[in-house]
Every structure is written in structure tokens, then in C-alpha cells.
Amino acid sequence: MAINILIVDDSALTRKAIRRIIGMLDLEVDEIIEAEDGLDAIEKMNGPVKIDFILADLNMPNMGGIEMIYEMRGNEATKSIPVAIVSTESNTARIEKLMADGATDYLHKPFKPEQIRDLLLRTVGV
């Protein structure tokens, strides 16, 4: 079963890098959709493509990753979509709070392609 992934990051370069890594991993991915912030992501989640998994930055303009998760968890249509935060955040207490607040997983930037693969395998099993 192929999945649809939403990459949410205000850096076009980071989105492109993650897209390229996912493409190289030979995983069952149907579509990769990009959003530049949490507001854009919420709009895309309510669009025609069913989102199965989200990779989101923490700090973005307009709406950051954690605000996006709060918004998602309050919406019946999006509350069960797994969200992995991909960030430079290294404060263990902050990461634990992110997980308690609804993030499914966490990946520290910079990351290696294998870490993206492992994250996708353990979170959505592709």
C-alpha cells in the first residue's frame, strides 16, 4: 500500500532534500506534497489528497509544527495522521513535551537518509 507524505518546512531547500531522500529509498510512496508552514499544511490536509504521514519542521512563520499538531488533533479528519517533527531542537525536555503534545516521532537535523528511511518504516511501515 503506497502512502502520501506531506513535508512541512519553510525552507524550500530542506523540502527538496527530504523529497529527494524519500525518492532514493525505494519505499512505497505514492505522492509527496509540500507545504511552507503549518497553515499551508492544514489547507493541504483538507485538500483532495489523503495524507498518511507528515514530516514537519518545528519553527516556521505563520504556524509552527507544534501549533499545527494542536490544530490537527482538534479536527476529526486529521487527528490520527502521524506527525514526525524534523528539527534542530536538541533540548530533551522540549522533545519529550513535543511527544506528549501529539508528535509521533522526532528526527534531529541534520539527518542521514537512513534516518528518514528508519523513521518511515517504524512509523508507517512502508
Image (tube, helix red, strand yellow):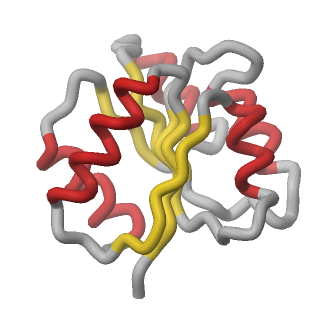
Between residues 22 and 93, which one lies in front from this camera angle?
22
Between residues 116 and 49, which one lies in front from this camera angle?
49
Count of marks placed on residues: 0
Up/down of 98 relative to 103, above or below: above
85 relative to 14 in the view: left or right: right
The percent position of residue 56, horizontal first and vertical second, equals 52, 36
Which quadrant of the structure image shows residue 81? bottom right
Up/down of 81 relative to 59, above or below: below
14 relative to 21 in the view: left or right: right
The percent position of residue 27, horizontal first and vertical second, equals 24, 71
Q: Which residue is pictured at 17% across the width and 69% down the height? A: 26
28 relative to 55 in the view: left or right: left
The percent position of residue 90, horizontal first and vertical second, equals 34, 14
Up/down of 48 relative to 108, above or below: below
Q: Which residue is pictured at 77% across the width and 38% down the height? A: 70
123 relative to 53 in the view: left or right: left
Between residues 99 and 107, which one lies in front from this camera angle?
107
Q: Which residue is pictured at 28% across the width and 35% down the height? A: 17
Up/down of 62 relative to 107, above or below: above
Quarter occupied by the C terminus: bottom left
Outermost residue to the right? 75
Which quadrant of the structure image shows residue 80? bottom right
Q: Which residue is pictured at 27% across the width and 66% down the height? A: 121
Quarter occupied by the N terminus: bottom left
The percent position of residue 76, horizontal first and vertical second, equals 86, 64
